[in-house]
Image (tube, rainbow, N blue to C red):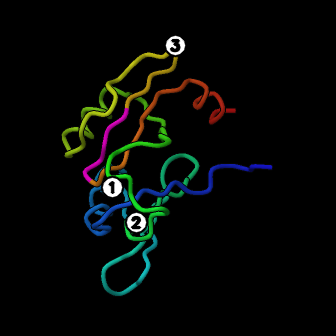
């Protein structure tokens, strides 16, 4: 039934500021924006080995309003060095959500709260690399 992750969407009151922050995090510029002129209400990036879609949506379009605090599901992005990625995110203005933790052999996770109130997870997962190579 499900064929793969199509899009991860985060919300921000200032989409342009969030776009710029994530361009620094990802090392790529957003490839899509709506509206094309004026302040964006939505921007989208292609990220990583599989070019997954990462969108930032104006908070006014959040379903059921915003909760006012970080929470909910955490999308984890594979990184080669969780501790280094975690420290880099903190240096860019993110706040600690969950310090790096080894969850088992070949499996380390951490998460931060971005400057816009979203939880961003990073992980090293050997299985990800095994699938990518196979």
Q: CA distance from mark 1 to mark 2?
A: 9 Å
Residue drawn at (55%, 53%) of the image = 52
Q: Position of residue 49 (x, y in %)?
A: 54, 46
Q: CA distance from mark 1 to mark 3?
A: 29 Å
Give the residues in magenta. 111-115
Q: Is residue 1 magenta?
A: no
The secondary structure type at the circle numbered 3 is strand
First in sequence: mark 1 or mark 3?
Answer: 1
Instruction: Give the residue drawn at x 32%, y 58%.
Output: 23
Residue nearest the observer in this picture, 11 or 52: 11
Residue 130 point in image, percent of width and height: 63, 27
Mark on residue 104? 3
Quadrant of image for the C terminus: top right
In this picture, residue 78 sits left or right of residue 89:
right
82 and 102: which is toward the camera: 102
Q: Dot 2 corresponds to which residue?
A: 30
- Answer few, some or many: residues within 10 Å of disc 3's Cα (few below 14, many 20 plus, some between 14 and 19): few
State if disc 2 and disc 1 touch (CB < 8 Å).
yes
Of the numbered discs 3 and 2, the one sitting upstream in the chain is 2
Rendered residue at 35%/23% (across/down): 100
**Secondary structure type for disc 2:** loop
Q: Is residue 67 left or right of residue 91?
A: right
Q: 31 left or right of 85?
A: right
Look at the picture and state if 108 lies above or below 87: above
**Would you call the spot at circle 2 few (<14 residues within 10 Å), some (14-19), or many (20 or more)?**
some
- Image height of 41 relative to 131, above or below: below
The residue beneath circle 1 is: 22
């Amino acid at each position: 039934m499900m064929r793969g992750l199509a899009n991860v969407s985060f919300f921000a009151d200032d989409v342009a500021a969030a776009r710029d922050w994530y361009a620094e995090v990802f090392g790529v510029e957003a490839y899509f924006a709506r509206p094309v002129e004026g302040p964006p209400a939505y921007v989208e990036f292609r990220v990583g080995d599989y070019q997954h879609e990462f969108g930032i949506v104006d908070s006014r379009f959040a379903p059921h309003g915003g909760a006012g605090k970080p929470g909910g599901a955490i999308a984890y992005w594979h990184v080669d060095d969780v501790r280094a990625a975690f420290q880099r995110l903190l240096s860019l203005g993110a706040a600690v959500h969950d310090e790096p933790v080894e969850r088992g052999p070949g499996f380390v996770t951490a998460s931060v709260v971005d400057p816009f109130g979203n939880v961003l997870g990073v992980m090293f997962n050997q299985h990800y690399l095994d699938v990518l190579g196979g």
